[in-house]
């Protein structure tokens, strides 16, 4: 699909590199979309740090650059940069919480360590730090900063990150990286050599199944709050709809993250989101 010249730089980046979040933005009020695009483009910049540097020190320097840039935004002196300038406008317009940005950047330093989390709880901590704060910032852009929306947003953020990590097992395996909890991997007898050779196994499926179960639990907790959640929050919570879809695909594949159904495009996602939006669900 050809990119529209009418899209902003941030919108183009999100559409190219974070298609699912781009689609959720289309269901936000028009006046709030650029704020969301700026926020998600910022997330792309920090999230790919470990992929674009050759050593950990360079990654820390890159992340510190973003910390400094955010300090300048909050001081009213944003740098000239295609992401920072629109992000500064969003921060000013919506009063975005500084601590959410700081925690998100700090969590990305863990990517530079290249160590698997010890336990499922630690993996959830990572998911919360890298994703839940982003959802909370999106809710602020949407003007939905009530307590129930925030609680739902936390669960949606964790579920979305965990589902994404499960779908990314093949990608990380090619890089000899493991985000699955070490405790679960060892208990299941997961052969890392086989995994890094891009071979699936019953042990891998068992670990994925246990993490996927937590995705389902977080989605259930988020959805239980739906009667209390502000209507304005819906676009920020729509990733839950797609996380639920991917969870279903994982189950159908026997929790095999190498199954081709999980690696290809998902052309029906826009219709899934449209249906959820119409019904007021996530």
Image (cartoon, grey):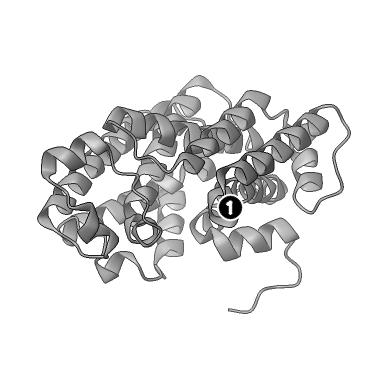
Disc 1 crowd, CA 10 A, few/some/many (<14, 14-19, 20+): many
- What residue is at 74 percent from the left and 39 percent from the top? 90
Residue 199 versus residue 2 in the image, above or below: above
Residue 275 lies, in percent from the top left, at 41, 56
Whether 229 is drawn above or below 35: the answer is above
Horizontal and vertical percent for residue 151?
Answer: 44, 25
Q: Quadrant of residue 117?
A: top left
- Which residue, as the protein is rendered here, is positioned at the far bottom? 2
Residue 278 versus residue 102: which sits nearer the camera?
Answer: 102
Tag 1 secondary structure: helix
Q: Reply above or below: 248 against 211.
A: below
Say which residue appears at 70% left-offset and 73% top-offset. Answer: 4
What residue is at 20 percent from the left and 60 percent from the top?
A: 194
Whole-percent x, y for residue 13 in the image: 65, 61
Q: Kindly tell me whether residue 96 is visible in this rendering.
A: yes
Observer-nearest of 188 and 157: 188
Q: Which residue is mark 1?
A: 25
Whether residue 235 is situated above or below residue 15 in the rendered picture: above
Q: Residue furthest top?
A: 147
Residue 199: x percent and y percent?
A: 21, 65
Q: Is residue 154 left or right of residue 188?
A: right
Count up the numbered dots.
Answer: 1
Quarter of the picture holding the C terminus:
top left
Instruction: Tell whether 100 sits left or right of 260.
Output: right
Q: Quadrant of residue 122?
A: top left
Q: Tell me, yes or no, if residue 231 can be seen here.
A: no
Dividing the image into 4 quarters, which one contains the N terminus? Answer: bottom right
């Amino acid at each position: 699909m050809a990119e529209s010249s009418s899209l902003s730089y941030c919108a183009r980046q999100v559409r190219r590199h974070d298609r699912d979040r781009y689609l959720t933005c289309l269901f936000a009020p028009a006046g709030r979309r650029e704020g969301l695009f700026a926020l998600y483009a910022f997330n792309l910049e920090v999230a790919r740090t470990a992929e674009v540097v050759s050593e950990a020190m360079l990654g820390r320097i890159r992340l510190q650059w973003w910390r400094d840039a955010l300090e300048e935004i909050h001081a009213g002196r944003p740098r000239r940069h295609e992401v920072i300038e629109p992000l500064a406008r969003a921060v000013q317009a919506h009063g975005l919480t500084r601590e959410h940005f700081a925690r998100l950047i700090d969590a990305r330093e863990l990517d530079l360590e290249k160590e698997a989390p010890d336990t499922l709880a630690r993996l959830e901590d990572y998911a919360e730090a890298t994703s839940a704060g982003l959802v909370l910032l999106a809710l602020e852009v949407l003007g939905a900063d009530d307590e129930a929306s925030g609680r739902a947003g936390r669960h949606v953020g964790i579920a979305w990150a965990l589902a994404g990590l499960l779908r990314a097992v093949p990608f990380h395996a090619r890089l000899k990286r493991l985000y699955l909890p070490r405790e679960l991997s060892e208990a299941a007898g997961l052969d890392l050599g086989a995994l890094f050779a891009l071979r699936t196994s019953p042990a891998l499926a068992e670990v994925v199944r246990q993490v996927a179960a937590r995705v389902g639990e977080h989605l259930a907790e988020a959805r239980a709050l739906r009667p209390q959640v502000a209507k304005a929050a819906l676009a920020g919570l729509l990733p839950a709809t797609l996380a639920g879809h991917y969870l279903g695909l994982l189950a159908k594949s026997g929790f095999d993250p190498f199954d081709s159904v999980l690696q290809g495009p998902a052309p029906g996602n826009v219709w899934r989101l449209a249906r959820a939006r119409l019904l007021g669900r996530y």
